[in-house]
Image (tube, helix red, strand yellow):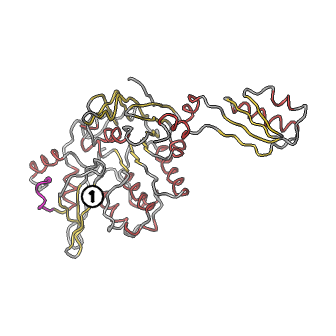
Amino acid sequence: MRVGGDQTGERSSGPCCGDGAYVGTWSQWERRREFRGITLGIRRGGKQRGKALGHRLIDSPEEVAALGQERGDGVTHRRDRSRTRCACERIDALHTAPVFGCSGSVGTVTTAIEVEDLSKSYGDLRAVDGVSFSVEPGEVFAILGPNGAGKSTTVEILEGHRRRDSGRVSVLGVDPSEGGRAFRNRIGIVLQEAGVDKELTVRETLDLYSTAYTRRRSIDEVIEMVELADKLDERISRLSGGQQRRVDLALGVIGTPDVLFLDEPTTGFDPAARRRSWELVRDLAGNGTTIVLTTHYLEEAEELADHLIVMAGGAIVAAGTPESLRDQAGEATIIRFALPSIDASLAGLLDPLHGDASGRDRRLEISTTRPTADLAHITGWALQHGIELDGLSVESVTLEDIYLRLVGTDS
């Protein structure tokens, strides 16, 4: 990471027409949090339910309208909600949508994401102000900050869902605002709320979404990744909140993305499920997927992030690895323990220490900026003298401590 001033595949078809067929209506453009989606329906017994199909599967409304005029395929925009087509034909049409600002595939790049002097305003509000950073392939990169810090706007620009005012942005070697279908086919997005039809089963949902990708994973592989094999034929409405969130994760990875955007991915997870999801993120990154993570769980960022930035007021106020941020904070680590007794040998323990020692009764507290060296000396001394250090503990400054100092406790 640097912070500073400076596939194509075989085209697939969707489900076939007939009894129980998917029938699509181009009824609206939407993005939950500025998330564009395709509204589809499932026709069963003459009834049709709306379905938001999306993540990053489509081009702009103007592009799709142009596509409909070129092909005469009946694709319509918001003002014409009457036409319906078989979803397999509609998704097939999406696979042949024109690509803007990109060839049929995205080239190999040495840096997954490059951002230089990015700015975005909403009227008089400067939401993002001169932000610069880079993300390497296979890196987990966390963007932290309070509400209104500019995180969401920054990520939406990276996803291609929002246009910047100024600056340079490159994701997989492409300007996201001009990347088109080839670009969107190589990124995955897990929003805080995906907007899936909760009356569909998990299998139906994954099958429907998977048809829009050229490099899709199998449903069996994805369902194993998110540990929902026993819920595959369960309606989503019957799943717990954490299980529904795992479906969102499955939709984010089903297209085998090269860059995966995770927005609060473990909300609603119990501690055990959260840690299992961390293993999934590590596995994806280990296999070369670049991951951009936004989370309010500071422990999650500390556990997963290779590099991170902290934003406040639209600007970056801190950047680096979790370890380097702790070092930059210059905060001392506290080592505490109790001795069986206090005698003359204590001088041999305290004199070589780099930190300051204080004590009361038999308990000692060492405040040090070199905890590794001092802890090694303390434990070595104890072993040499055959002494057990009762209640030995090491308390370091946490990422949460640093975050709160940077952005304030009110955040």
Q: Is residue 4 above or below residue 195?
A: above
Q: Taking 145 as reference, is 401 left or right?
A: right
* Residue at image mark 1: 52
How many labels were placed on the picture? 1
For image coordinates 66% across by 34% down, the residue present is 333
Q: Is residue 110 above or below residue 232?
A: above
Q: Position of residue 31 (x, y in %)?
A: 27, 50
Is residue 321 or residue 213 the one in the foreground? 321
* Amino acid type for the residue under numbered disc 1: Ala
Residue 147, image quadrant: top left
Residue 259, image quadrant: top left
Q: Position of residue 397 (x, y in %)?
A: 61, 37
Q: Position of residue 72 (x, y in %)?
A: 9, 53
Secondary structure that dominates the magenta span? loop
Is residue 314 or residue 177 the one in the foreground? 314
Q: Is residue 77 magenta?
A: yes
Q: What is the crowding at mark 1: few (fewer than 14 residues within 10 Å), some, or many (at least 20)?
A: many
Q: Position of residue 1 (x, y in %)?
A: 45, 31
Q: Secondary structure at mark 1?
A: strand
For image coordinates 37% across by 67% down, the residue present is 237
Q: Is residue 94 magenta?
A: no
Q: Taking 41 as reference, is 339 left or right?
A: right
Q: Is residue 51 above or below residue 94?
A: below
Is residue 323 or residue 66 the one in the foreground? 323
Magenta-colored span: 76-84
